Image (cartoon, grey):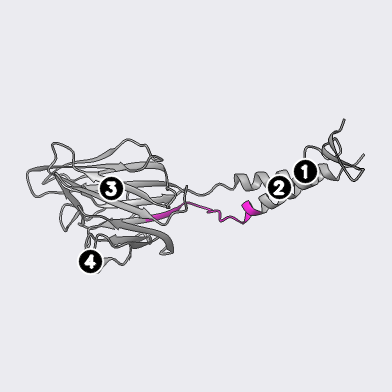
């Protein structure tokens, strides 16, 4: 049974079919709109795999160029000098990305405190460099260049090897913004002359804000004299092709239904 409404113009009756058994659930105009929307989604860039960016902190200002690690992956080197400067980031294949790292005041470079073997879980070996933050100070980092709403996993790494009898270090990390209401995480280290310590904390499924940025704040918790940060891994989560496939499949379905006439 057809559902319809009637309009009259200069005595001529116009019957417009909204829903009918012949047209399925959509009018011709609806199918055209669906086609346009499906094509729009299909034209959107879809990452086939997660984009990974590795960062090694603590280098002098003249060493900001990325380096190739022993496993063939490329690692960004970052210093605190010129803290307001945005540093362009490359991915592990040395491909250019749209992302930038900006360190705001607070961190200091160090050439000691890290083992030369590499960090726990960090995909590339890392030398004895890193950022540190003294107790009572704060620091912040802005990651920019994301598409608004992009989902990102970010892991922070810290390591400590000391010449003293023992040492403890702690760095608390907060992600800023209402869209990322996640609990703070602390990189807590304890090391001796014989044993080094390595720690990592993960912030998963962070959301880039409307400006395409994610911001972190860093503090040293009570009981610690200093906090360390040696490495960062950024993983941009692939955009799912599910909705594009859904609209493409729906388009084919309605085209077939629309082609049937009684």
Q: Are marks 4 and 1 in contact (CB under 8 Å)?
A: no
Residue span colored magenta: 40-53
Q: Give me the disc on residue 157.
A: 3
**Which of labels 2 and 3 is toward the front?**
2
Q: From the viewer's side, name the closer residue of 1 and 59.
A: 1
Query: Circle 1 — which element?
Result: helix
Q: Residue, x 29% and y 41% (percent of image)?
A: 174
**Which of labels 1 and 2 is toward the front?**
2
Location of mark 4 (residue): 61
Q: Give me the disc on residue 254.
A: 1
Nearer-N-terminus badge (1/2): 2
Q: From the viewer's side, name the closer residue of 68 and 153.
A: 153
Location of mark 2 (residue): 34
Do we see residue 125 in this rendering? no
Query: Circle 3 — which element?
Result: strand
Q: Are marks 3 and 1 in contact (CB under 8 Å)?
A: no
Q: Is residue 166 left or right of residue 83?
A: left
Q: Is residue 242 left or right of residue 190?
A: right
Outermost residue, left direction?
165
**Which of labels 2 and 4 is toward the front?**
2
**Which of labels 3 and 4 is toward the front?**
4
Separation of disc 2 and disc 3 at Cα? 46 Å
State the quadrant of the N terminus. Answer: top right
Residue 144: x, y in percent? 38, 55
Q: Is residue 47 shown in magenta? A: yes
Nearer-N-terminus badge (2/3): 2
Query: Circle 4 — which element?
Result: helix
Q: Give me the disc on residue 162.
A: none
Separation of disc 2 and disc 4 at Cα? 53 Å
Separation of disc 3 and disc 1 at Cα? 51 Å
Separation of disc 4 and disc 1 at Cα? 60 Å
Judge the density around disc 2: few (<14), some (14-19), many (≥20) Cα neighbours within 10 Å. Answer: some
């Amino acid at each position: 049974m057809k559902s319809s409404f009637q309009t009259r113009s200069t005595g001529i009756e116009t019957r417009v079919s909204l829903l009918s058994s012949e047209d399925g659930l959509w009018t011709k105009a609806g199918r055209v709109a669906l086609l346009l929307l499906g094509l729009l989604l299909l034209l959107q860039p879809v990452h086939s795999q997660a984009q990974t960016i590795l960062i090694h902190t603590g280098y002098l200002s003249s060493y900001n160029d990325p380096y190739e690690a022993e496993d063939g992956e490329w690692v960004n080197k970052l210093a605190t000098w010129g803290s307001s400067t945005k540093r362009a980031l490359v991915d592990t294949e040395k491909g250019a990305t749209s992302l930038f790292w900006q360190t705001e005041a607070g961190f200091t470079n160090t050439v000691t405190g890290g083992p030369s073997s590499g960090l726990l879980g960090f995909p590339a070996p890392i030398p004895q460099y890193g950022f540190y933050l003294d107790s009572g100070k704060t620091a912040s980092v802005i990651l920019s260049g994301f598409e608004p709403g992009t989902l990102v996993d970010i892991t922070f790494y810290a390591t400590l090897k000391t010449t003293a009898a023992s040492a403890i270090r702690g760095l608390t990390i907060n992600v800023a913004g209402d869209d990322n209401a996640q609990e703070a995480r602390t990189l807590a280290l304890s090391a001796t002359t014989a044993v080094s310590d390595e720690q990592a904390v993960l912030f998963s499924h962070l959301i880039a804000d409307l400006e395409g940025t994610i911001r972190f704040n860093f503090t040293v918790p009570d009981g610690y004299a200093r906090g360390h940060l040696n490495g960062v891994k950024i993983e941009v989560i692939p955009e799912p092709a599910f909705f594009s496939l859904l609209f493409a499949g729906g388009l084919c379905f309605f085209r077939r239904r629309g082609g049937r006439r009684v």
